[in-house]
Amino acid sequence: MTAIIVSDLSVRLGGNPVLSGVDLTVEAGEWLTVIGPNGAGKSTLLHAMAGLIPAVGTVTWNGGSLDGLSRRQRSQRVAVVPQHPVVPPGITVFDYVLLGRTPHIPSLGRESQRDLAIVERVCGRLDLLGFATRHLDTLSGGERQRAFLARALAQLDGSLDTVLLLDEPTSALDIGHQQEVLELVDSLRVDAGFTVVSTMHELSIAGEYADRLVLLAKGEVVAVGSPTEVLTHALLSEHYGANIEVIETASGPVVVPVRRGLPG
Amino acid sequence: MNRSNVADDSTDVAGRTTNHIVPRLRPAGLRATWFLGALAVLVLVVVAGVAFGPVSLPPGAVAAELVNRVFGTDLDTGLTSQQAAIVWKLRLPRVLLALLVGAMLALAGGCYQGVFRNPLADPMLLGVAAGAGLGATLFIVARAHGLSLSTQLLPIAAFVGALAALGATYLLGAAGGRRQGTVTLILAGVAVSTFLTAVQTFVQQRNVDTIASVYSWLLGRLTVASWAEVRMLLPYVLVTAILVLLRRRELDVLSVGDSEAAALGLHPKRSRLILLLAASLGTAAAVSVSGLIGFVGVVVPHIVRLLAGRSYRSILPLSLLVGASFLILADLIARTVSAPAELPIGVVTAFIGAPFFVLVMRTTKESAP
């Protein structure tokens, strides 16, 4: 089944074209990662898919137009973890995760026992119960990233055909925590059956976790396919302007930067 | 063994769960103890405000008199009819007016701080108070020039002024770049405030004959309080309080910024606008009967925040109660400290508010935002 169909999507920000004519299909339950050089429009594509920025073109979710849903209905089905989420000073992890229940709480009402139970369960799943009463701004980078994920999971809980959009989920983490967070996302995806669309800078890691990669350059899709199809020397050196070497390994292609001008 | 393992058993993000854990963790919100405590303080302060003054009455008798009036009971108060008249005709309206004004300024201040995500935001800073002041001044001057306008319309004039100022602040802030967000807005508010205050001074200078009444209004006056003022202010206070308190959870959601709030299903601009209009209506109405009383809007929400936590779900209702107590107390001091003369209430709010604020800041571990 298809989760999201993006067709002929164009976005202009401040008069400048950021995305032009993007076509993309995301299968339900898959992990699709958008890669591309800085300024290629990766984040913009992610936010346009969530309907959070004005765009020309159509985004269809599970066969229905995005425009046909209220913002609240949309938010019950798609959660976004931005690259740098705002950390309100002094908020506890529990209250932060509870914010994820916002689209499920009546606009002038308050959270139900069920909402609280979901938050507690999600915190348990992400090993955050020990931090639940700690302030979010006192957590380490990896712990924070788990709290951000927990809010998104709490948001999607109770809805079907959900999509998790992750904007550079590992950019603030060391290599060990990168793996920890991505493994967590992957196991949650399998458990809960949601679809993941992420953007990522780390090409080798992107290839290891994604089912498919989309290479975006200057606002256009230049390649879509399996990691082996997209992480090629030709494509990457052309669009990143980088001097690299692609090494095939058991876990997929690994992209290594090589200093220009060195012999060999 | 540990809780996370227990919770693991029921993990199902798609919501097919049947196993509900009884939650032990409580969300940030209004705690009953804080609410009842603040309410109790308010009741005590009301009694004290009515009992003490140039002629002091026994607080117990005053309390009994108030209970009689409110609940229709027939307790023996021991008050002479003259003393009862002091309670009913002089003291109570003044105390209630201070209650309403204090509640409104503090609630509006807390609301602005949430809407702009800026701890310095308050009615004075955004030009709202200055706009209301100019609107009220023009109204007073127009009346002095013989326009037959009912004094009941004074809050409307102040509200129009407040809205015009807020609109100007908003437009200037937007012109300065939307990306900058709240900082530009505050800067625009300072510019608008300064400009409107200058206009107001100009209008006053051109109307020297009415300057005295405008000036006394500006300094803040609860001295002329009567039931008429209380009745005039009450509907605005109720509308504002209901609108703001019903939406207090939205301010917590707005604390993660517009973009994330939108992803959580909120319409940030819409909810901001509603909250701003409501808070401005309350501010304008309060300012139109009491004049410009500074300090309450900034300090009371901060004191509440430092004591009872940062969620707007507790800050707003507690600010309402604490602001009311604070201003009744300030007014009590203003009229007793150098009796029979009265101090301007703004002097008192600053005089007791600033040291108290510093004290709270120093004695709580959490630093100010």
Image (cartoon, coloured by chain):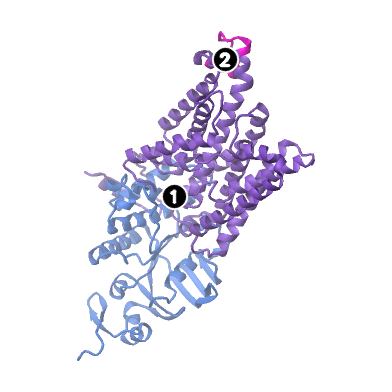
In the rendered image, residue A161, in percent from the top left (x then y), is placed at 45, 60
| Screen quadrant of the C terminus of chain A | bottom left
The residue at which mark 2 appears reads as B65
Subunit bearing disc 1 = A
Of the residues shown, which amino acid type is indicated by label 1?
Arg
Q: Is residue B39 left or right of residue A126?
A: right
Which residue occupies the foreground of this view, B53 or A115?
A: B53
Instruction: Give the colour chain A carries in the figure.
Output: blue
Q: Which residues are magenta?
A: B62-82
Which residue occupies the foreground of this view, B3 or B78?
A: B78
The residue at which mark 1 appears reads as A101
Asked whether residue B66 is drawn in magenta, I would say yes
Which residue occupies the foreground of this view, B240 or B112?
A: B112
| Secondary structure category for the residue under label 1 | loop
Residue B25 sits in quarter:
top left
Report whether mark 2 lies on the same chain as mark 1. no
Residue A212's place in the image compared with B174, above or below, is below
Instruction: Give the colour chain B carries in the figure.
Output: purple
Of the residues shown, which amino acid type is indicated by label 2?
Glu
In the rendered image, residue A144, in percent from the top left (x then y), is placed at 32, 56
Label 1: few (<14), some (14–19) or many (≥20) C-alpha neighbours in 10 Å = many
Residue A214's place in the image compared with B143, above or below, is below
Residue B262's place in the image compared with B6, above or below, is below
Residue B339 sits in quarter:
top right
Q: What residue is shown at x 56% (from left), y 28% (from top)? A: B342
Label 2: few (<14), some (14–19) or many (≥20) C-alpha neighbours in 10 Å = many
Which residue occupies the foreground of this view, A208 or B96?
A: B96
Residue B282 visible in the shown view: yes
In the rendered image, residue B173, in percent from the top left (x then y), is placed at 55, 60
